[in-house]
Image (tube, rainbow, N blue to C red):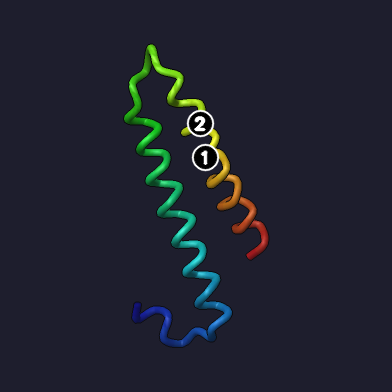
Amino acid sequence: MVMMAGMDDHERKIVMEFCHLLEKSKQLFNGLRDLPQYGHKQWQAYFGRTFDIYTKLWKFQQQH
């Protein structure tokens, strides 16, 4: 992580948290996309988790 060399600890933590939220949101969205389209109620819980992480990511972007 060469880009982080000039950052202080607080900035580094912000970038790391953003990257974590972004990666998690991508994983959850891809999992939601790959669920069967019909016949399963499995998507509801997955949708809730995906929506929650996207909400956290959005709030994080607004704060920083």
Residue type at mark 2 is Ala
Question: Outermost residue, top direction?
Answer: 39
* Residue 8: image tag: none
Q: Quadrant of the N terminus?
A: bottom left
Whole-percent x, y for residue 41 in the image:
45, 19
Look at 67% across and 62% down and name the residue there. 63
Viewer-closest of 47 and 6? 47
| Callout 2 touching callout 1 (CB < 8 Å) | yes
Residue that label 1 marks: 49
Whole-percent x, y for residue 8 in the image:
53, 86
- SS for tag 1? helix
Vertical side of 27 occupied by 17: above or below? below
33 lies left or right of 18: left
Vertical side of 63 occupied by 28: above or below? above
Viewer-closest of 26 and 49? 49
Viewer-closest of 25 and 48? 48
- SS for tag 2? helix
Residue type at mark 1 is Arg
Whole-percent x, y for residue 23 in the image:
40, 54
Q: CA distance from mark 2 to mark 1?
A: 6 Å
Identify the image quadrant of residue 64.
bottom right
Residue that label 2 marks: 45
Look at 47% across and 33% down and name the residue there. 46
